[in-house]
Image: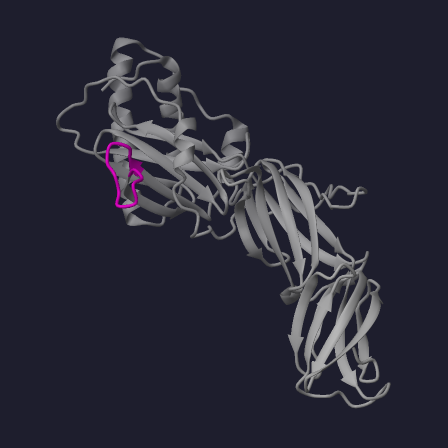
Amino acid sequence: MAFHTAAGRNRTCYFAQRWSRVRLKSPALWRTKSIFLVLVGLSHSAVLAQTPLPVPKPTIEAQERLATAGPRIENVSRSAVAENATSLDGAKAPDMRAAANPNVAFDASLLSFAPRLSLSAGLPSALREAPILVEAVASHNASPIHDGVVWRVFDPQGQGTDGHPLLVARAEGGAAAFDLPPGDYLIHASLGYATEVVRLSNRTGPIAEEILLEAGALRLSAVIDDELPIAPDEVRFDIYASNFAANGDRIVVARDLSPGETIHLNAGTYHVVSRYGTANSVVRAGLKIEAGKLVAATLYHKAAQVMLRLVNEPGGEAIANTSWSIYTPGGDIIATAEGAFPSLVLAAGEYTIVARNNDNSYSRSVDIESGASIEIEVITGDKI
């Protein structure tokens, strides 16, 4: 078993020393770790007999990083949609260990970005399996992510039922170890909506690799005007990529997100849509995500919660079995509702409200101002 460059030899020894200090809870991972260390030791001894080289030792900084439980994200920033965004200097770094998104599947488009390796042939016949050890980091010089990473290993020569490369192994958590027959593999890592895929080979023996996700985090919230809070169950967010699909629509990254969720994304620019209610209060913003940073963005709605009532006189009792339609000044319908006390959210602006009851129609023109909530009465005397 041979290592072909001094850099490859030093790198593998370095990972061996790191893994010798990692505490693993799973018995299977303990066995894989032991096999990996023994194989690396044998391989390294054979190479030293030919060309003696010093074994690099981890720096004090690297040892301190390995001893620290949980990842650290440096340079946390806050970016609001408003132009006067302020920094969160001194704030606690966000935890990148959020639960992995189960809906993030293998992205075949990433294969073109996975560089092919120059591999040498030859492997002792006695070695039927060789460990592949992987860990993920959010950004350069960051600590390894200890939880929330979903690992998928694919055989690029095989084909699954969905037409993608054949899935041969899967794991969740932080670092992962796979005992696989010698060959070439695609390693797919995902943290939330952040993904990366690399090509690795264990043809020449055990291999350990650090996968750079280039991942940041986004936390969204929304308010009315500058300060009025919105109930969490009344506002939702959609996130789109900056590029477009073949049909001209933006590519959807995530839909129907709640305020306050921490969403992990690959570094880049995204288009965010905030929907307050189900009618027409929609706010859009472009946000930039940087690797290793948390962006906390607030979107500002100009809208009001509106309650409608059809009455015979001002302040009178609401009439049941009423149908409602809300129109723009140009005649476009914005929303419909049913009942004596329907409630809905409308963006600030001018509207015509039409109430229908017992084959009669009544209307009223209103100018909605942004605020918490208002009540609008349509009088039966205002018959169309």
Residue 41 in the image: state x and y as whole percent.
Answer: 28, 25
Identity of the residue furthest to the top in this view? 51
Q: Does residue 33 appear anywhere in the picture? A: no
Q: Is residue 6 above or below residue 126?
A: above
- Left or right side of 372 for 218: left
Res 382 → quadrant: bottom right
Q: Magenta includes 337?
A: no
Q: Residue furthest right?
A: 314
Give the quarter of the image for residue 222: bottom right
Please state the horizontal and vertical placement of residue 40, each as a whole percent of the image: 29, 26
Of the 4 image quadrants, the one containing the C terminus is bottom right
Q: Is residue 108 above or below residue 263?
A: above
Depth check, front residue: 294 or 318: 318
Confirm whether the magenta stretch covers residue 160: yes
**Residue 62 visible, this angle:** yes
Q: Quadrant of the N terminus?
A: top left
Q: Residue at x 55, y 33 (%)?
A: 139
Q: Residue at x 70, y 80 (%)?
A: 356
Is 161 displayed left or right of 62 in the figure? Answer: left
Q: Where 186 falls versus 223 (above or below)?
A: above
Q: Who's the residue at 66% across and 71% down the image? A: 336
Locate residue 174: give its quadrant. Answer: top left
* Lateral position of residue 349 relative to residue 188, left or right: right
**Total labels drawn:** 0
The residue segment tinted magenta is 154-165
Main secondary structure of the magenta stretch: loop
The vertical placement of 48 against 67, above or below, is above
Residue 159 % position (x, y): 25, 38
Q: Is residue 17 left or right of residue 72?
A: left
Report the residue that reaches farthest toward the bottom: 317
